Amino acid sequence: MKKILVPALLCFIIATFTNFTQKSCNFVGSWDTDWGILTITEQSGKYKGSYPVNYGTGYITGEMTKDDWNTYVILKGTWTEGKATGKFEFKRFCNRNSFTGTWTNDNVKEKGTWNGTKIE
């Protein structure tokens, strides 16, 4: 009985920890960013978000990748604000409730930072 119980318990602990790490290390939720409150959702591996702009709403779409050790995640994609479009990249270390990022504008040669802190 002990020979079966110990490996089963160990597998349960590893699976629970892995599942917790994967769920907590992503971009889902609300973030207080350089460009206002950004709310991000995920469905089938695709991330979508929205944030307020002076004349309406801005949107992001992207995909997330992870490093091999679950140390950090990267969300890359595109943003749109009316007719303006561009690219963004956010990097989040899994042990932090914040991300650092950059954006570029396809319409004009602009770029900048886009950082955020998770709203609990």
Image (spheres, rainbow, N blue to C red):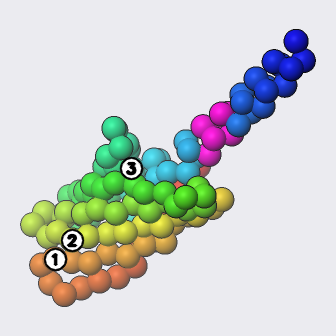
Residue drawn at (24%, 63%), measured in percent from left and top?
78
Label 1 sits on what residue type? Asp
Query: CA–CA distance between discs 1 and 2?
Result: 5 Å
Q: Are marks 1 and 2 in contact (CB under 8 Å)?
A: yes
Q: Which residue is mark 3?
A: 40
Binning the other alpha carbons within 10 Å of mark 1 as few (below 14), some (14 to 19) or many (20 upward) gives: some
Give the image location of residue 108, x and y in percent: 15, 84
Helix, strand or loop at mark 1: loop
Residues drawn in magenta: 15-21
Residue 31 visible within the image: no
Q: Is residue 19 magenta?
A: yes
Helix, strand or loop at mark 2: strand
Give the image location of residue 79, x and y in percent: 24, 63
Residue drawn at (43%, 57%), measured in percent from left and top?
65
The reply, left or right, for residue 67 in relation to residue 1 is left
Q: Which residue is mark 1?
A: 106
Question: Foreground residue, 64 or 56?
Answer: 64
Q: Earlier in the sequence, mark 3 or mark 1?
A: 3
Q: Earlier in the sequence, mark 1 or mark 2?
A: 2
Helix, strand or loop at mark 3: strand
Q: Which residue is mark 2?
A: 86
The reply, left or right, for residue 12 in relation to residue 120 is right
Question: Foreground residue, 115 or 56?
Answer: 115
Q: Nearer the viewer, mark 3 or mark 1?
A: 1
Q: Which residue sits furthest left?
A: 83
